[in-house]
Amino acid sequence: MFSSIIEKLLLADSSGRLNRPLTADELLAIGREAFEPLFHEPPIGPIPNHLAPHLSVHACVAEYEEQFEELDRWKAIELNQWLADRIGTNWVVAGKAYQLQAEKAEGATSEKFSFRLVQDRTECGELTTNES
């Protein structure tokens, strides 16, 4: 499943944003549609009941918006951890090999992730395309 999500994300990145370091929040903003399935089944999902948005509103709009913000924070934290566990993994997408890399600036609270295009396919070693 993860491989297909990364493939969709990399194929949709025509402007090359994913080759520069981005936080999990920024990755969610770019690829929200691609990442959304991750939050509904393991290993990340399902979304905890207390964060799941409800159809009926029994509170004021500000409380409802706060619930969505908390859900977004949860998604970013979970995606950050999930990506951190896959640093160094390689994928082949559209005939090009990419490697997930991360960097953490001094004093930063979270890592920034990027997908480096691997020019020399022998540099990749064995390419992983079946990540879950």
Image (tube, grey):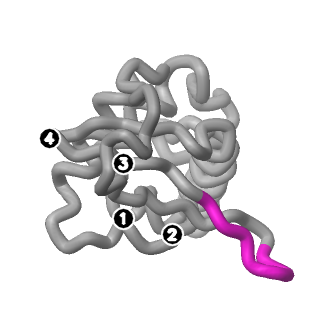
Q: Amino acid at mark 1?
A: Leu
Q: Amino acid at mark 4?
A: Ala
Q: Nearer the viewer, mark 1 or mark 4?
A: 4
Q: Where 100 sits versus 53, above or below? A: below
Residues 41 and 85: in front is 85
Q: Amino acid at mark 2?
A: Leu
Kind of element beneath mark 3? strand
Mark seen at residue 22: 2
Residue at the spot 16% in from the left edge and 40% down from the top edge: 95
Residue at the spot 68% in from the left edge and 64% down from the top edge: 111
Q: Is residue 96 visible?
A: yes
Query: Which residue is farthest front?
Result: 122
Q: Where 105 sits versus 16, above or below? A: below
Magenta residues, as a range?
102-108
Kind of element beneath mark 2? loop
- Residue 106 on the magenta span: yes
Kind of element beneath mark 4? loop
Residue 5, image x, y percentages: 33, 35
The residue beneath circle 1 is 18
Kind of element beneath mark 1? helix
Residue at the spot 73% in from the left edge and 70% down from the top edge: 104
The residue beneath circle 4 is 94
Q: CA distance from mark 2 to mark 4?
A: 22 Å
